[in-house]
Amino acid sequence: MFHIVALYTGVLLKGALKDVVLTVVSSILALILGALGAIGRIYGGPIVGGAIYWYVEIIRGLPAILQLFILYFGLSQFGIDLNPLSAAVIWLVAYGTGYAVEIFRAGIVDVAEGQHEAAKALGLSRFTTLRKVIIPQAFVSMMPNLTSFLVLQLKNTTMLYLIGYADIMYQARLGADATEQPGPLYLMVAVEYLVISAAIARIGSRVERRIAAYR
Amino acid sequence: MPVFLKGVGITLELTAAALGIALILGFLLALARLSTIRPMVAIATTYIEVVRSIPVLVLLFLSYYSLGQVGLKLSGPVAATVSLGAFYATLYAEIFRGGILGVDRGQTEAARALGMGRRMTMVRVILPQAFFSILPNATNQLSNLIKDTSLVFTLGVADLMFQAQAASATTFQPMDMLLLAGMIYFAFYLILSKVLARWEINVQRSRS
């Protein structure tokens, strides 16, 4: 068992690194789109707001894996063949955006109504209000959700092996088939995810504390 | 279409079985975390923190392949039920804990002052009040559970996702098949999120 651990640690770590990079890049993109989406959802009127509402509902209502398969296998029916990496990025960003919109929306709505009124009374424009008053405050209440958002994105990367993206899960499966020793390999995958999630949670709570102190 | 319906049946069976495990185990975990016995709190907390951080897909593989290697061979559906149940138990444990902690302390004190035992206080006073406050979160997780059952096709369990995959391979029309399955999943989501949510609001309004 131990020689398997020794043999595969390097490969699995390399796969894990790919997952982490993918998580970080897709999360940043998804958060930017999510913030824009939340603003559109709240201030965009019935058409833009409604469209974003249904986008969020569809993302949250369909199994993640089904969405990935629609992108990767479904689109091929119309001759659009994405390679695993681009399908993975599009999927993670599209999926993450759906969740990010809700996080930002909840954060913005959470800021007391009085703040909007006070800013208006002081003659601040809507954009300035949003940028200087609402978003800084919304950020504080959003922090715990942002941490779980990152963990969710990270966990979703496990499904990427199903479209042939060579991440940690893919390597573990190859190894399990080659050595007929699935036990230690999947255990190692579990441990690596545990460590990475714990690291995200640790960073999250540290940032939370710092923001709370700043407040 | 009939195979899809069969798949839906298996998806629902799996959901129900996993939900059963998750509710029972989750409730026990919540009680253990709230107890005053140190080792029990530690065990429950560790279980919740560890299992919650592992992706469902990895849990499925652990219970199906890894346990199989050490002689505990589970069939696909059993492994799927156990791992989904074990994972969702951690989520339900936190929901239950929040619900129980959310009941005003005065309620416990009043019940104790009336001479009720600890168990009776829990069953007769705390839980009925906690029940309605946890309903929204509980149904929310249920709709997540239904979605996560879509992962069990990786163990060869013939659920809705599995049938959609199989149909894609035979018809060469993956988009149509996946969208059909998607519509079924989405219908469940809408039922749980819209209809139940409305019912819950009505219940809560009539109670207050």
Image (cartoon, helix red, strand yellow):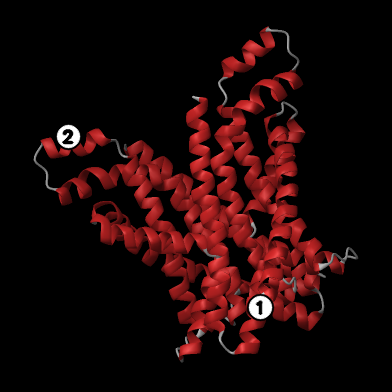
Subunit of mark 1? A
> Which residue is depicted at the point 64% across and 79% down?
B165
Q: Secondary structure at mark 2?
A: helix
Subunit of mark 2? A
The residue nearer to you, when weighing B102 against A84, is B102
> If the image is split into quadrants, where does the C terminus of chain A sit?
top left
- Residue B121, by quadrant, is top right
> In the rendering, at what x and y percent does residue B197 appear?
50, 44
Q: Earlier in the sequence, mark 2 or mark 1?
A: 2
> In the rendering, at what x and y percent does residue B33 appear?
69, 34
> If the image is split into quadrants, where does the N terminus of chain A sit?
bottom right
The residue where tag 2 is placed is A118
Residue A171 badge: 1
Q: Secondary structure at mark 1?
A: helix
- B7 sits left or right of A182 in the view: left
The residue nearer to you, when weighing A193 against A120, is A120
- A79 sits left or right of B63 in the view: left
> Which residue is depicted at the point 63% across and 56% down?
B145
> In the rendering, at what x and y percent does residue A25 appear?
42, 69
- Residue B59, by quadrant, is bottom right
Circle 2: residue type: Ala
